[in-house]
Amino acid sequence: MAIESIAKTLGTGSGIDITSLVSQLVDAQYAVKNDALTKKSEALTSKISSAAEVKSNLTEFASALASLTSGTTLNTQPTSSNTGILGVTGLTGAKLQGLSANIEVRQLAQSQVASTNAFTDGATHDFGTGSLTLTFGAATVDGNGAMTGFTAGAAAAVAITIDSSHNTLAGVAQAINAANAGVTASIMTDSSGARLVVKGATGASQAFTLEGAGGTLADLDVGVGETGSTVNTKAQDAIVALDGVQTTRPTNSIYGLIEGVKVDLVSASPGTKVNIGAKAPTDAIKQTVTNFVETYNQVLKVVKAAVDPATGPLRGDAAAKELLRALKSITMSQLIDNPAEGVPSTLSGIGVATQRDGTLSLDNSRLSSVLTNYPSQIESMFAASAGLTRVMSAISDKAVSKVTGLGASEQTYTKQQSDVAEDREDAAAAAEKLRTRMTRQFAAMDSRVAAYKNTQSFLTNQVAAWNKSS
């Protein structure tokens, strides 16, 4: 007989709810084990969640600091006395303290722009097939836009094929642009028709000639003596004078003129000297230290709660305890390599103190004083990939490490959680096996009781019959 059928008939002989009795007996036998497994699972879940929270707080803290220090807001920045003439930008890692210079912009760099005569039938004008040849070099142009001289440069000429799908004025512009030869082409249309406009890169050596071959492509020629086109703007270098010393550059964005500074020329103003100076990031560093202290205190609270000896989910986790120790020692960590005697080189040296409860406080007057007396040294504490960023990144690396950090702890707890799930399955299987065995045993007992009842009923009836006969 199947267990389901046995369960339905149990108790018919004895009158006892044996199905309920068996369930209660089995549940009672495994209650302690199941309760222990539940508590263990809940504890592991709490550990995994706490480890993830601590790790997330530390990595986000370190990442935000690294992002801030990788920019230029915490570096001394160059200044320009006339941004209408030129702008200046400090490059990452540049040492600009004490920068002082003047620049005169005598000429802006510009590119050659040439346009053809107008074609009255517009952009659909048909030139036939053939090729165009671009040659780069240096050119002289008179006041009327005529090229009067050209010296080819070292770069090889560029041949552009004009096939049957690009033989119109619009198609020629497309073919020139598709060649990526260092010039761009466009079509300008007005009441007189459409013309091809070709623009090169800035710099005196980026002048160009254009020569057509095949069909009527020669109508597009740009060069010495060509009457079918005009050089609207001539190619030229920028001319600047740094502290009176003249130099040329092919573009208006200049690197290397002043070490660590990019100079962007805006307009030419011969005779006007623009003063270049430097501005220390005093206010930015003050705000950064203030924000660091506030964020540190929030992160410390999370880590301390995680390892609290009484209630912390990670109170027995060595990796979490090591992270707390690392955080507590941060104010004494060396943030400057080989500092000179007397130069502040730690957070405590610039006014960040550790209080009794482990949180940090900031002495603003002390910070202002050291920023005034040691501006470049304090700035180096907040340099990219160095100083405070390096220390926080090391703590973050400890947190995520899958060998000795919380990354390893998470793996261990997750494995233990998986083991608990397997133990639950084993306990459930054992309980079901016991339930089946006890059900069969009670079924046999119930069957015997039913037989005894039948015998008792027969004997009772028999005795009654005998008594009646007497």
Image (tube, rainbow, N blue to C red):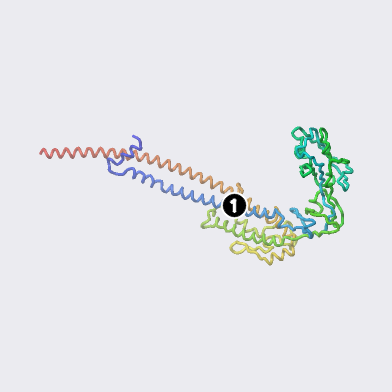
Residue 341, how many percent across, how many down?
75, 62
Residue 390, above or below 344: above
- Element at label 1: helix
Q: Residue at x 45, y 49 (%)?
A: 36
Front position in the image: 347 or 382: 382
Residue 104, above or below 7: below
Direction from residue 50 to residue 375 in the image, left or right: right
Residue 370, how many percent across, how many down?
72, 64
From where the camera sits, is residue 366 visible? yes
Front position in the image: 352 or 158: 158
From where the camera sits, is residue 152 visible? no
Direction from residue 468 to residue 103 in the image, left or right: right
Front position in the image: 189 or 197: 189
Front position in the image: 184 or 21: 184
| Quarter occupied by the C terminus | top left
Q: Residue at x 85, y 50 (%)?
A: 248
Please tell me how crowded label 1 is: few (under 14), some (14-19), or many (20+) other residues with Cα within 10 Å. some
Q: Residue furthest bottom?
A: 365
Direction from residue 20 to residue 277 in the image, left or right: right
| Quarter occupied by the N terminus | top left
Residue 280, above or below 403: below
Residue 61, quarter of picture: bottom right
Give the residue at mark 1.
56
- Residue type for callout 1: Ser
Residue 456, how many percent across, how many down?
21, 39
Number of marks: 1
Residue 88, above or below 187: below
Residue 316, how many percent across, how many down?
54, 53
